[in-house]
Image (cartoon, grey):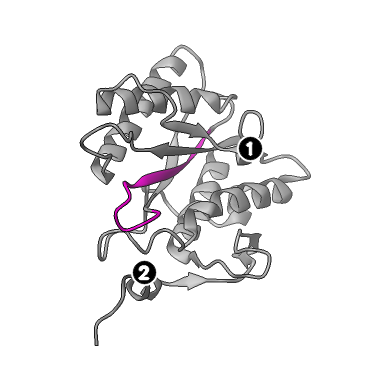
Amino acid sequence: MNTTTTERTMLKKTTNESTYRGFKVNSGNSKEHACFTKTLDQIVDTIEYMLSRHSKVLSVRIDIQSAIHTKTPLTSMDITRIIESAVRTLDAKASKGKNDPDIHYVWTSEKTTPDDTPHFHLNFFANANAIQNGYAFKDAISIAVKRRLQTTYDGLVNFSDSNGTKGKLIERNSPDVYAQIDAVVYAASYLAKARSKEFNPKWSRVSSCTRITRRTLSDSIR
C-alpha cells in the first residue's frame, strides 16, 4: 500500500493539544491543527538554554519568501547560509558593546502546494542586553537574502505581526516570566504546525536549529 504525502508527514510525531511541556501552543481553537513535537522541543529547549545564560532574552519571528521572478528558489542550504551571514552582521554590529548577542534560532520550510516554491519561517533568540530591537534581524536577513538571490527586490522578508513592535521579551527576574515564556512559545509554535509541510520533499527535516545543551526550566530561571 502506497503512503500518501500527508500520511508520511504525519508519521512524524505530532500533538493536537493546546499545551506542550506546560506552555500554550497554537493548535487552533478546537485543537484542529497538529504541531510537530520535535519543533516544539527545539523551541522550548532553546528558550530554557537562553534563560540559563542571560537575564533578558529577545524572541523574533521572521518569514522568508522565495522571489517569484528568480529562476532558482531558495533551498534549505540557502537558508543556512543566509542565517550565518545575518548572524555575522549582527555580531559585528554588537562587537563594540560589552554584551554578546549569543544568537540562536529555529527554522522550518513549507510549501503551500506541491508545485509552489518553498517559504521559510524562522524564530531567533538573542541576548536582549545586546540586541533590543527585533528589526535588526529583519534588516540583516533582508540583506543576506538579496545577496543570496542576487536581486534588489524588496518584500521577500517579513517581520511577523506576532512580534509586536520590536519582538517578544522574556525577563528572567520578572514576576511575569512564566507568562512571558508562554507568549513566546505560543508565537513560535506557528513554526511547528504540520499543515503546509506535507508537500516538503519525502523524509526531509521538519525543522532545524542551533545545537544547545538541554536545561530544565527550573535551572534556567533560578
Q: Amino acid at mark 2?
A: Thr
Q: Amino acid at mark 1?
A: Lys
Q: Horizontal and vertical percent for residue 100?
A: 47, 25
Relative to 45, say whether 69 is above or below: above
Mark 1 or mark 2, whichever is nearer to me:
2
Taking depth in this image into account, of 112 and 175 the one nearest to the observer is 112
Which residue is most to the top? 96
Q: Horizontal and vertical percent for residue 199?
A: 33, 61
Which residue is most to the bottom? 1
Residue at 52 percent across and 42 percent down: it is: 50
Say which quarter of the image contains residue 68: top left
Few, some or many residues within 10 Å of mark 2 (<14, 14–19, 20+):
many
46 in magenta: no
- The residue at which mark 1 appears reads as 168
Q: Horizontal and vertical percent for residue 59?
A: 56, 38
Taking depth in this image into account, of 35 and 41 the one nearest to the observer is 35
Q: Secondary structure at mark 2?
A: helix
215 horizontally vs 64: left or right: right
Residue at 28 percent across and 39 percent down: it is: 74
- The reply to whether residue 111 is in sight is yes
Q: Secondary structure at mark 1?
A: strand
Q: Residue 134: which numbered mark, if any?
A: none
- The residue at which mark 2 appears reads as 9
Marked residue nearer the N-terminal end (1 or 2)? 2
128 horizontally vs 146: left or right: right
Q: Which residues are magenta?
A: 112-126
Relative to 146, say whether 57 is above or below: below
Quadrant of the drawing holding the N terminus: bottom left
Look at the numbered discs 1 and 2 and tell me whether their residues touch, using CB distance below 8 Å.
Answer: no
